[in-house]
Image: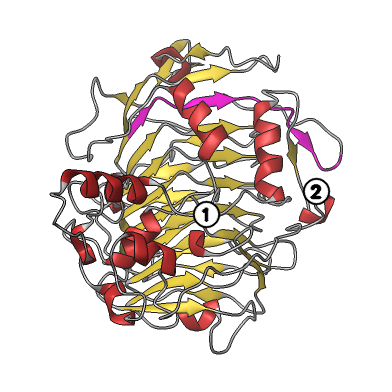
Amino acid sequence: MRYTTIGILLLAWVLLACDEKEEVSGPSVPFPDYGEVLAFPGAEGYGRNAVGGRHGEVYHVTTLADSGKGSLRDAVSKSGRIVVFDVAGIIRLQSPLTFSKNLTIAAQTAPGDGIVVYGNQVSFSGADNVICRYLRIRMGVNGKDGKDAAGVAYGANMIFDHMSVTWGRDECFSINGDPKKPGDQPRNITIQNSFIGQGLQPHSCGGLIQTTAENGVTLYRNLYIDNKTRNPKVKGLNQFVNNVVYNWGNGGAYIMGDTEQTSEADIRNNYFIVGATLNYDGKTLGATAPFTRYNEHFRAHLSGNYYDENKDGVLNGRELTREDCTKRKQESGTEIVITPTFLDKPSDVHPAIEGLMTARDAYEWIVQHGGASLPARDQVDSYLVEELTSLGKKGGIILTEMDLPAQGPGEIKSGTKPLDTDNDGMPDDFEDTYGLDKNDPSDAMKIASNGYTNIENYIFLINK
């Protein structure tokens, strides 16, 4: 079964707890109580309260075609939808893909190996209240030069979870305020549990995370990998917690803006690991220090961050100190010391990170669970994990995805959609387990006692 056995155990418990003459039927078998209603259980940071398509309708993606009825493009063209996938494979984009507001994208519902969106850029600009999970976005060398694989220029209340975003020709994944919309800066956005990597040369970049000091972005438990620079480059209100940065080059890892704009950052429990830094032309790119381009306008709390630079195949980094974020230079015989403005504790303006862990534990978690890991990791993400776990022995900065072992996105197995008699997005065996009506398509969008719709509860319980 692709959903958790929790439901079966709950059913057994209810049956045993009842009097012999009582019968359990319908929704009396409860879904788990997840506590506060968030975008989904485990949502963190500034984007944790995104609603997505919770008050809309279910839309089935039934084709891998670029456009037309049942396509992903059609699915995201209108707001108010929870999007599920009846097919698996590679969607080859013929033009940029733009998302509407109030959408939940549940790519973990796909059969087989899941979904890859390949060949062009994806825009979430203006896509307020979007929840996007387990989607792979791979732009590639055929995408337009100077464009990001994925990005947000304006909009609010978004969360991206278990994404894999690669092969951008400018940035891989940017949240970068549009100067033409000064009153609509990106805000209340989270990227978590995701892979952001392999930005293509000659402009191999992880991403710009640039807002204002009032508009927050959370980066939690992500892997930045194989980007020459901008892993990420930050201005504004930022949480950078429990991330791993691997195999950056001579452009920079976490870049602190270098601007007169005030920034406020919480940088905690991250692991920076130097890789082989082998450029596509065979030359080795020397990695910079983990933190660069800081000044007094960048206010930062730094603690629990580690740096492993010895490339010995063992995770044995040292803890970074404020001295690692200090530059000294001589001007007219006087020593000038440049640092960010150090904060002894994170600013109270930041939301609490409920799943906070040590840097080492974050590394282990990312290796096991990070990226678009459901319904299965694809060849690209598996290769990235192989590089990461070499701990300095492997790591390349690429010119084209065709130079990789999979020579592009690789093979994505199709699989078979589980039986769903009423076509409401919830398989029959799930509805039977939880006492729902597999002949009633309207029950998918009904709100359960835990505050989520029935179909959201199905999505939360999917595993492999």
Magenta part of the chain: 266-281
Mark 2 residue element: loop
User: Is 179 in front, or is 407?
Assistant: 407
Q: Residue at x 39, y 52 (%)?
A: 461
Q: Residue at x 21, y 32 (%)?
A: 347
To which quarter of the image does residue 287 belong? Answer: top right
Residue wearing tag 2:
404
Give the side of residue 130 with respect to residue 133, left or right.
left
Q: Position of residue 141 (x, y in %)?
A: 74, 62
Q: Name the outermost residue toward the right.
A: 282
Residue 83 in the image, given as x and y percentages of width and height: 43, 72
Residue designated by label 1:
173
Q: Residues within 10 Å of mark 2 (few under 14, many from 20)?
A: some
Residue 276 among magenta residues: yes
Tell me which label, 2 or 1, sits earlier in the chain. Answer: 1
Residue 463 in the image, given as x and y percentages of width and height: 48, 49
Question: Mark 1 and mark 2 in contact (Cβ < 8 Å)?
Answer: no
Give above or below for 101 relative to 387. below
Question: In the figure, residue 278 lies in which quadrant?
Answer: top right
Report the residue at 56% width, 69% height from top.
417
Q: Amino acid at mark 2?
A: Leu
Crowdedness of circle 1 by 10 Å Cα count: few (<14), some, many (20+)? many
**Colour setting:** secondary structure
Residue 32 to residue 396: above or below: below
Q: Is residue 297 visible?
A: no
Determine if the magenta segment contains residue 215.
Answer: no
Q: Is residue 463 left or right of residue 78?
A: right
Q: Which mark is residue 8?
A: none
In the rendered structure, the answer to whether residue 61 lies left or right of residue 213 reads right
